[in-house]
Image (spheres, helix red, strand yellow):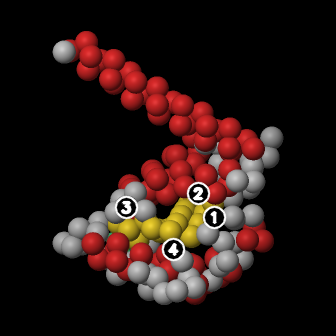
Amino acid sequence: MAKAKPRVAVLMGSDSDWSVMMGAVERLRELGIECDAQVMSAHRTPDRVSSYVSGAAKRGIRVFVVGAGAAAHLAGVVAAHTTSPVIGVPLNATPLQGMDALLATVQMPSGVPVATVAVGGAENAGILAAQILALSDPQVAAAMKRFKKNMAKKVEAKNAKLQQQL
Ligand code: RP5
């Protein structure tokens, strides 16, 4: 069977971001969503960012999850080149521990939003991308419901364990 086309692009400024950004890919795959993962940089490879993002909708990409650290301009630049939703993941890559990336990612000018998750919040970014796709895809919506149920079950199991220790 042919592999499904990626619907989410997980982009990151450097391969040093991968250990965190793989959390988004893992959550998306668990929810049955194919994604493309690429390293590209707003500062080091600006032309590549522009060409990748400009052609993405035609290739089937619906949502972008974008992580970067330091002067984290990648998510904002991606948002400048697309009308699709962009979820930004600020990363802890400098002695400022992600505060630099958080402000660079979240403080977008009016008209060009980047939905910013917590510093290092790649998993939540993947889940949010799935929730966006779920609005128009009943299979993803069902997968999201199962995900929430499983999460609740895990918490109930933890509580039951605690009760036994009291
Ligand atoms: C950012 O600078 C990247 O997103 C990364 O978080 C940080 C450091 O990049 P490398 O020097 O490890 O390539 O652009």
Instruction: Give the secondary structure at mark 2.
Output: helix
Instruction: Give the residue number, with chain letter if any, for mark 4.
Output: 114
Where residue 120 sits: x, y (%)?
A: 36, 59
Q: Residues within 10 Å of mark 4 (few under 14, many from 20)?
A: many
For the residues labelled 3 and 4, the Cα–Cα distance comes to 13 Å
Vertical relation: 92 (above or below) 45? above
Q: Within 8 Å: ligand 1 and the Cβ of disc 3?
A: no
Residue type at numbered disc 4:
Val
Instruction: Give the secondary structure at mark 1.
Output: strand
Instruction: Give the residue number, with chain letter if any, for mark 2.
Output: 129
N-term-proximal mark, 1 vs 3: 1
Instruction: Give the residue number, with chain letter if any, for mark 3.
Output: 118
Q: Residues within 10 Å of mark 2 (few under 14, many from 20)?
A: many
For the residues labelled 4 and 2, the Cα–Cα distance comes to 12 Å
- What residue sits 55% from the left and 55% below the top? 128
Q: Are marks 1 and 2 in contact (CB under 8 Å)?
A: yes
Farthest residue, direction right: 1
> Which one is nearer the viewer's eye here, 71 or 164?
164
Res 61 quadrant in image: bottom right
For the residues labelled 3 and 2, the Cα–Cα distance comes to 15 Å
Q: Residues within 10 Å of mark 1 (few under 14, many from 20)?
A: many
